[in-house]
Image (cartoon, rainbow, N blue to C red):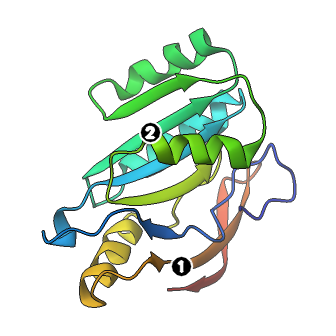
């Protein structure tokens, strides 16, 4: 899903679709978004993803964190996010597709987004924009934006390569 030269480097999600899981009569501006986040034990990348998710201007978010790393270490890292809506589930399997399917089954949100540790949305208002598009377009089955960026860890700089919504 993400474009990264090295899987150990953080990167923006290149294709982060927002999928409608259930149609309702209520306004999509109030719809819960479930972000299924896969973690394979790289806590520094997990922290980046979680911080960026919770910096979103849209706040009706739950995280379904499927963790195949060290559960206790991840739990320690999650203390920083205490009070946030995070389901932390320890898993053994490594197959991403199976994990995402399991996460979707656990999701309570009307919309679902799939991310891996180290992936995140480029702009703080990106999720709000996607929800607005859902409302303006009579709740389509899927909404997606294409953003990607490479982050230089040495320089701490972000170079925007492409943005299109």
When the figure is inspected, residue 48 is found, relative to residue 70, above or below; the finding is below
Q: Which residue is mark 2?
A: 106
Mark 2 residue crowding within 10 angstroms, few (<14) / some (14–19) / many (20+): some
| Location of residue 119 in the rendering, given as x and y in whole percent from the top left corner | 62, 53
**Which callout, 2 or 1, points to the residue nearer the camera?**
2
Mark 1 residue crowding within 10 angstroms, few (<14) / some (14–19) / many (20+): some
Q: Nearer the viewer, residue 126 or 141?
A: 141
Q: Secondary structure at mark 2?
A: helix
Q: How many marks?
A: 2
Q: Earlier in the sequence, mark 2 or mark 1?
A: 2
Evaluate whether residue 42 shows in this view: yes
| Location of residue 15 in the rendering, given as x and y in whole percent from the top left corner | 63, 71
Q: Which residue is mark 1?
A: 145
When the figure is inspected, residue 52 is found, relative to residue 151, above or below; the finding is above
When the figure is inspected, residue 20 is found, relative to residue 119, above or below; the finding is below
| Location of residue 99 in the rendering, given as x and y in whole percent from the top left corner | 65, 40
Question: What quarter of the picture does the N terminus occupy?
Answer: bottom right
Residue that protrudes farthest toward the right in the picture: 5
Q: Nearer the viewer, residue 109 or 49?
A: 109
Q: Nearer the viewer, residue 121 or 134?
A: 134
Q: Is residue 127 left or right of residue 28?
A: right
Instruction: Measure the alpha-carbon separation of dots 2 and 1.
Output: 24 Å
| Location of residue 44 in the rendering, given as x and y in whole percent from the top left corner | 65, 32
Residue that protrudes farthest toward the left in the picture: 26
Evaluate whether residue 49 shows in this view: no
Q: Is residue 130 left or right of residue 60?
A: right
């Amino acid at each position: 899903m993400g474009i990264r030269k090295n899987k150990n480097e953080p990167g923006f999600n290149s294709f982060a679709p927002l999928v409608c899981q259930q149609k309702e009569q209520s306004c999509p501006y109030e719809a819960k978004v479930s972000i299924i986040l896969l973690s394979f034990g790289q806590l520094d990348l997990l922290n980046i993803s979680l911080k960026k998710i919770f910096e979103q201007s849209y706040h009706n978010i739950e995280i379904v964190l499927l963790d195949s790393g060290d559960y206790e270490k991840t739990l320690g890292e999650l203390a920083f996010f205490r009070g946030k809506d995070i389901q932390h589930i320890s898993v053994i399997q490594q197959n991403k597709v199976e994990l995402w399917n399991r996460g979707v089954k656990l999701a309570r949100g009307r919309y679902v987004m799939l991310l891996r540790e180290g992936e995140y949305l480029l702009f703080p208002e990106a999720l709000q924009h996607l929800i607005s598009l859902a409302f303006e377009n009579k709740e389509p089955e899927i909404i997606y934006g294409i953003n990607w960026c490479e982050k230089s860890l040495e320089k701490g700089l972000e170079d925007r390569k492409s943005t299109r919504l």
